[in-house]
Image (tube, helix red, strand yellow):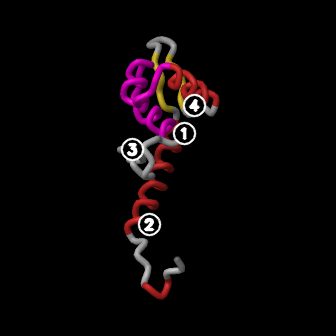
Amino acid sequence: MRYAATAVNNSKYRSRLQIVADILFVAENGAKKTRIMYQANLSYDLLKRYLAEALEADLISINKDEKSYITTQKGKAFLKNITNIVSVVRGFKSSSKAPAKMRWC
């Protein structure tokens, strides 16, 4: 499964959900903090904060033997749901050309 939630909004900033999804995507097959930090494009302070939140929500777990993080089944379900929502939103945006009679603005 390929994560495709980036560039849904026109903002230059990512939402909290996008950041968590980026972390979970990087850690799907296991990743250390440094890899997550660089591939999710986060500062170390933000990484620590979001990893703590993801751990608390049971979206990610720690492999203490390898000192790495891995996305849990709950985290994979979260990624799948976010990807589905993004595809629906993108489809809605592209087909939002309503006939003239239906335009209220």
Residue closer to the observer: 71 or 93: 93
Region rendered in magenta: 18-44
Sequence-first disc among 3 and 1: 3
Residue at disc 1, secondary structure: helix
Sequence-first disc among 1 and 4: 1
Query: At 54% from the left edge and 21% from the top edge, which residue is drawn?
Result: 48
Sequence-first disc among 2 and 4: 4
- Please identify, in this view, whether the residue under mark 1 or under mark 4 is nearer the observer: 1
What is the residue that sits farthest to the bottom in this orientation? 101
Mark pair 1, 4: CA separation: 11 Å
Q: Are marks 4 and 3 in contact (CB under 8 Å)?
A: no
Q: Amino acid at mark 1?
A: Arg
Mark pair 2, 4: CA separation: 29 Å
Looking at the image, residue 3 lies above or below residue 30: below
Residue 37 position in % (x across, y down): 42, 24
Residue behind mark 4: 54
Query: At 56% from the left edge and 34% from the top edge, which residue is drawn?
Result: 59
